[in-house]
Image: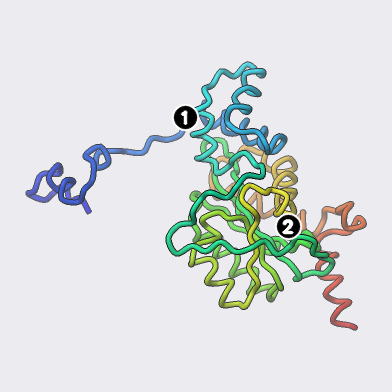
Amino acid sequence: MIDRTHDLPVSRQARALSLARSTVYYRPRPVSAEALALMRRLDELHLDYPFAGARMLRALLRRQGVLVGRRHVATLMKRMGIEAIYRRPNTSKPAQGHKIYPYLLRGALIERPNHVWAMDICYIPMRRGFVYLAAVVDVASRRVLAHRVSITMEAGFCVEALEEALAKHGRPDIFNTDQGSQFTSLEFTGVLTAAGLAISMDGKGAWRDNVFVERLWRTVKYEEVYLRAYDSVSQARASISRYLAFYNGGRPHSSLDERTPDEAYFGAQAMATAA
């Protein structure tokens, strides 16, 4: 919108657009190595203590000899897309045009593939930056049906993963997410509605409502992400894809009677088809 080659001074262009001059001249700065290391540690602590807010995380860091202020911790948590998880009144208002759907899984018995799919986003640290991972998971079999890695938390990469899962694996009865803006956006819910799916959303701050995907994040981070130091986004994508292929096809789960997610997903489907 701002044309620096125009005869009209930049200050007057900014005034005409109701923009602050500081916004016009702002140049984003790369995240420092110290901040990236702190974000990595915050991510680990959040996995272990999901109920911890900025104050408690600051206290935990200080016990480890890391002196940092609460506000800086809160700023980094916002950038990472994490927050303390606990039951509280839902006083937040959705963005204009965004609808919050009720939670449909309370008391539900989920025992077959394609009954319920769930989706979430998590923060992935790299050597010199970070990315976000979104995954669609079949709840009964724990199988990752589709995933995407993105440098931003916008809805687009979530929609891509959703559309891939629907194209490759049909459709579930219920699709569950949290109340993140990516999942309440018309762009995302429009795909679910067009596919005729029942839409379910977690209660605000109720991590147990989507615990199926939370368990996946813990596994992915401790068995893959924290063992690596990705040098680039492309390396992160390739390495995470390899791990998820192993997770689906080679990693037995105690909750699945030592079967892999592939065996639980495709085995049950094959039996249903044969019947």
Q: Which residue corresponds to the image point at 73% horizontal and 40% vertical from the top-left?
A: 222
Q: Position of residue 74 (x, y in %)?
A: 52, 33
Q: Can residue 136 be seen at all in this image of the molecule?
A: no
The local crowd at label 1, few if under 14, some if 14 to 19, many if 20 or more residues have their Cα within 10 Å, is few
Image coords of residue 252 (percent x, y): 86, 54
Q: Is 38 placed above or below 153 here?
A: above
- Whether residue 36 can be seen here: yes
Provide the residue designation for mark 1.
32
In this rendering, is residue 224 above or below 201?
Answer: above
For the point 82% across and 56% down, the residue is 250
Callout 2: helix, strand or loop?
helix
Q: What crowding class fits label 2: few (fewer than 14 Cα within 10 Å), some (14-19), or many (20 or more)?
A: some
The residue identified by callout 2 is 245
Q: Residue furthest right?
A: 257
Pick the quarter of the image with the C terminus: bottom right
Q: Nearer the viewer, residue 58 or 245?
A: 58
Q: Position of residue 194 (x, y in %)?
A: 56, 77
Tell me the quadrant of the picture where the N terminus can be found: bottom left
Question: Is 224 situated left or right of 8 in this image?
Answer: right
Q: CA distance from mark 2 to mark 1?
A: 33 Å
Across and down, in percent, residue 181 comes to 51, 55
Mark 2 vs mark 1: which is more N-terminal?
A: 1
Closer mark to the observer between disc 2 and disc 1: 1
**Mark 1: secondary structure:** loop
Q: Nearer the viewer, residue 201 or 111?
A: 201
Q: Residue at x 66, y 66 (%)?
A: 175
